[in-house]
Image (cartoon, grey):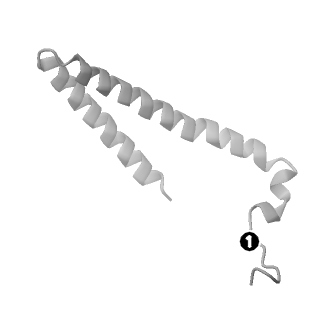
């Protein structure tokens, strides 16, 4: 359910990075601004790739294991002391 918010924030960040890079190239001696914009684009792209591809792959591998079938790992135990 959070995919739209994640997508919108990443697209907004890409747009801002484009503006920063464009402004950095038009202003004299603003290589740090261009470097920051480029670094931010790379960071957001790697973060999106990791969140989409790597996390889904690891979860799919984990679901097939015996460890994923143990419900105490993913639920709240309501014993005598916890009620």
Residue 16 position in % (x across, y down):
26, 36
Q: Residue at x 68, y 39 (%)?
A: 57
Q: Residue at x 34, y 23 (%)?
A: 38
The one of 60 and 17 positioned closer to us in this rendering: 17
- Element assignment for label 1: loop
Count the marks: how many?
1
Above or below — where is 59 with respect to 31? below
Q: Residue at x 74, y 71 (%)?
A: 76
Residue 59 position in % (x across, y down):
70, 46
Residue 74 sits in quarter: bottom right
Q: Residue at x 77, y 50 (%)?
A: 63
Residue 3 position in % (x across, y down):
48, 52
The one of 51 and 28 positioned closer to us in this rendering: 28
Above or below — where is 36 with respect to 75? above
The one of 49 and 78 positioned closer to us in this rendering: 78
Q: Quadrant of the C terminus?
A: bottom right
Task: Find the residue positioned furthest to the right.
Answer: 66
Q: Is residue 31 left or right of residue 77?
A: left
User: How dense is the environment of label 1, judged by Cα within 10 Å: few (below 14), some, or many (20 and up)?
Assistant: few
Above or below — where is 8 with respect to 26? below
Residue 33 sits in quarter: top left
Q: Which residue is mark 1?
A: 76
Residue 30 position in % (x across, y down):
18, 19
Q: Is residue 45 left or right of residue 67?
A: left
Above or below — where is 51 with respect to 67? above
């Amino acid at each position: 359910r959070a995919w739209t918010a994640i997508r919108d924030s990443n697209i907004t960040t890409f747009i801002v990075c484009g503006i920063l890079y464009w402004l950095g190239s038009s202003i004299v001696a603003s290589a740090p601004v261009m470097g920051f914009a480029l670094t931010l684009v790379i960071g957001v792209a790697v973060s999106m790739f990791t969140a989409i591809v790597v996390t889904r792959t690891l979860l799919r591998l984990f679901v097939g294991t015996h460890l994923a079938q143990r419900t105490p790992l993913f639920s709240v135990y309501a014993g005598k002391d916890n009620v």
